[in-house]
Structures are given as C-alpha cells and as structure tokens.
Amino acid sequence: MNGQSSPEFSALLTAQQDFSVCVKCAKESVDTDAPRVDYLYLRFKEATPDEAGLAEIVYHQIVNYAIPRKKIRELIERSQSNPLDFSLHSKIFEEAKRAFIRYDSKATGPMANIRYGEIGEVIAFCVASHFLTAGQVAAKMALKTNAEMPVFGLDGIHVRGESDGTITVYFMEAKVVGEAESGAEQYAKSAGGFDNDRKHKLNEQRIARDLSNFDMFEGALREAALNYFDPYGQASENVRERFVGVVVYSEPLFGTKIPVNDATPLDAHEKHFVKSFESLFGGFKSALEKALKSHSAEPGRCRAFFLAVPDTGELKKRFAQQMANEHIR
C-alpha cells in the first residue's frame, strides 16, 4: 500500500433487495479459502422452489446491468421536469431488451437455446452486487452492436473499495449449464486462460478505463478511479484481482420432496433440501480444484458461486417469457 485512499465506489453499487430474498446462501466461503466456493439455492415457498420469482427478479435488473450508469442518471434528471411521464423509462427498458439474444421457442433437443445464456450474466451482476457488495464498472452487454452477435470475453467487471485504501476488482463470468461439474470445468478453463493471458487482462482494463461507469464520476474522483486501471501506474499496485464464476445449474435434489400437509412446518421443505444439498459441497469443491489445476489457474485468485435451480432450461424459458411480456397467445 502506498498511502493512497480508495475512491468511493459505493455509488456504482446496485442494492438487490428482491434478489437477496429469492437467492439464499447455504454455505459461504471464508477469505482464507483457495479457491473460495459459495453454495447458493432458490428460496422455497412451502414445497416449491421459487424459480418463477427468480426469472422475474432478474428481468427487473436488465436495465441496471445493460445500460451505463451515466445514461440512467441522465434519464432520471430529464424525467424530473415531468415526473408523470414514464415514456422515457419505457424507452430505456426497451433499449436494454434489444441487447439480448432472442429465445427460439421452436428449438428442440439437448442443444436447444444453448446460446441463450444471458440470463446468467444478469444473475452474475446480481451476485456481485449482493454477495460481493461490488459495483459494476462495465458489462460486455454495453459493447454490443447486434443483439444476435455474441460478445466474447468477460460478462462484467465489478469493483469494491477496501478500508485499507486498496480495491478489489472482480472479473465476472457466468455459466448456465445442466450439471454443476460441467460448469466448474468451463469456469476453470476460462479462469486459467484469463490468468495466463496478459493481452486479455490489458483489454479488460482498457474497457474499464474507456467504456465504463466511471464516466459518472467527475474531476479528481474520476481520475483516481481510472488510475487503478492503468497497468503502468503506481495505483495499480493496490489492486487485488479476482476471477469469479457464477455457475447456474440444474439440481436434481429439488425433485426429492417430503409430503405437503397441514402438520408439516412451512420451512421443513427448505430445510430438507438444504440438508441434502450440503452433502454435495465436498464433491463440487474437489471437482473445481481439479479443474483449476488442470488449467493452470491460481486458486487464490478464483471464486465460484454455485447456484442450484430446478431446471436451467425452464429458467431460460421463464426469463424469455418475461422479456416478451407474454402479450401474444
């Protein structure tokens, strides 16, 4: 540390009141773990995991994820002159929706809509905002010129200022998969590639400097924030980089239920799931550690969130239905 105070990055943070209720943590990692692994799952409404609620909550976050903060702030300022006119809000919401790949309702088979994974990117945004308390600096969605054209690279960059004046930068990548082990392997491959690819890192730092939410800051505050992402500057010595994978996967244990009746406590169903879910944690972490080693990734710079849902295919469909507003029968 060189005595430099950290800029106030909390202005970039989006509070996640709804997401924090819908997605729960069964086991949280500690800062001495390497890698850090956190296990998340959907809340239950009696015996039913709230997959529909998650799709709706994530849909409500698409503007926060895909639209730059400066544009959102300008919208709010413009709307103050006519607070009863919500057309500006509708326009920016439609702009966000246009950035997403379209869901193909006619596709069938195991590979159907495999590219329709952008719900995972928004979930990763929510995870970083809530569980990491890190504000978004940039999202790859903002780089799109064509909704159907995939943009390769990280899904998002988040940052958190620490009390000692350093900052932690979280490079986010989401995987929406059928099996947890498959997601762990895909994440580990990306982590190893990123960890050992200086050109990739420099490009992501360029995006953070040139195409980021830092443009909502002004003067010395903006300059201080940008200095952290100058790879040749002194402030870059005070940066801790972490590559974070959010693995959303289909968990069969949701199908193992206890009877529903008036004598069963409402929370018994969720407790039953969590008890079984906990038995999987050791296997998940072992699989991840093995994959990280095989791809030469540094475990101490890696963190994975496994989010268990009943069916990722159904989650994608529900999200697509929200995007379409379900106005056509």
Image (cartoon, grey):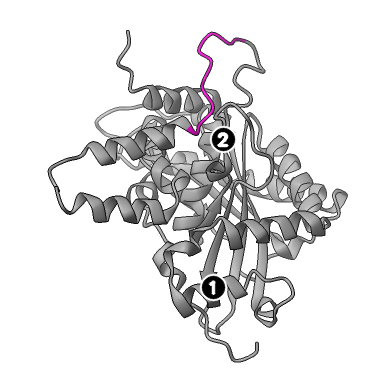
Report the span colored magenta: 99-108
Crowd band around label 2 with a 10 angstrom C-alpha radius: few (<14), some (14–19), many (20+): few
Q: Position of residue 133 (x, y in %)?
A: 47, 63
First of labels 2, 1 by sequence position:
2
At label 2, the amino acid type is Thr
Residue tagged by mark 1?
225
At label 1, the amino acid type is Ala
Tell me the SS state at disc 2: loop
In-front residue for pair 35/283: 35
**Picture disc at residue 71:** none
**Picture disc at residue 145:** 2
Q: Main secondary structure of the magenta part?
A: loop
Quadrant housing residue 167: bottom right
Magenta residue check for 109 = no
- Quarter of the image with the C terminus is top left
- Asked if 84 appears above or below 102 in the picture, the reply is below
Q: Residue at x 61, y 45 (%)?
A: 279
Q: Position of residue 240 (x, y in %)?
A: 66, 71
